Image (cartoon, grey):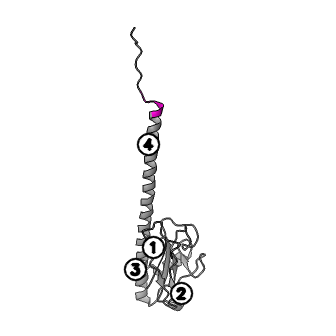
């Protein structure tokens, strides 16, 4: 006797589960790569922003003979200007002829000192008693950015907030 029932073709449950597992594995690899690429992109943006800021600071120094003084930040202390509070606006006013607006970190933290792991902001320091020196501290997400550090022209003290234990914290200045 012939079987007249139509053959139903399709995938078995095991085949479907294998395909779903492969798609899940591939998507997790792609997402991990994408996150790494995003972090590298933010680090490149940070480096570019800091270089633009350094150029504006050098132009200010050229016109005034000193770097603009810092102050008013809530962290690490009131001697700094930090991109996560109103002290940044004060520094922006001083640098307005040289730079349309001061940059903020692409992953800007709401508060904190960028010398602390996981805090993303820019901090600027220069004092009036030694106006021929400044430093900027910021944090990179990747390990592809090295921290050159800087020396305080007043005291000769080397500053390297990144050091060897905080690999992503970058210190640059007027060395």
Mark 1 or mark 3: which comes first in sequence? 3
Question: Given this view, does label 1 or label 3 mark the residue nearer the observer?
Answer: 3
Of 25 and 49, the residue lying toward us: 25
Task: Return the x and y of residue 164 as percentages of the image width and height.
Answer: 50, 74
Check disc 2 and report the residue beneath it: 127
Per the model, the C-alpha gap separating discs 3 and 4 is 50 Å
Q: Position of residue 75 (x, y in %)?
A: 59, 75
The dominant secondary structure in magenta is: loop
Query: Residue 78 falls in which quadrant of the image?
Result: bottom right
Please rate how many residues cluster around mark 3, counting C-alpha atoms within 10 Å: few if below 14, some from 14 to 19, many from 20: some
- 6 or 1: nearer the eye? 1
Mark 4 or mark 2: whose residue is earlier in sequence: 4
Q: Is residue 45 left or right of residue 169?
A: left
Q: Position of residue 104 (x, y in %)?
A: 49, 70
Tag 4, which secondary structure? helix
Element carrying mark 2? loop
Mark 1: secondary structure:
loop
Of tags 1 and 2, the one toward the viewer is 2
Residue that label 1 marks? 101
The CA span between labels 3 and 2 is 19 Å
Residue numbers of the magenta segment: 10-14
Nearer the observer: mark 4 or 1; the answer is: 4
């Amino acid at each position: 006797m012939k079987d007249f029932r139509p053959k139903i073709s399709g995938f078995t449950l095991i085949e479907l589960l294998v395909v779903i597992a492969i798609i899940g594995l591939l998507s997790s690899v792609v997402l991990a790569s994408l996150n790494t690429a995003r972090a590298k992109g933010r680090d490149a943006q940070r480096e570019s922003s800091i270089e633009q800021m350094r150029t504006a600071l050098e132009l200010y120094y050229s016109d005034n003979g000193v770097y603009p003084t810092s102050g008013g930040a809530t962290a690490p202390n009131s001697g700094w200007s930090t991109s996560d509070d109103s002290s940044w606006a004060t520094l922006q006013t001083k640098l307005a002829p040289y730079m349309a607006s001061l940059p903020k970190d692409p992953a800007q933290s709401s508060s904190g000192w960028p010398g602390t792991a996981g805090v993303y902001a820019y901090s600027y320091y220069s004092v009036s008693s030694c106006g021929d020196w400044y430093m900027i501290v910021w944090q990179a997400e990747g390990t592809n950015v090295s921290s050159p550090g800087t020396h305080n022209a007043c005291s000769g003290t080397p500053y390297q907030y990144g050091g060897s234990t905080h690999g992503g914290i970058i210190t640059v200045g007027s060395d």
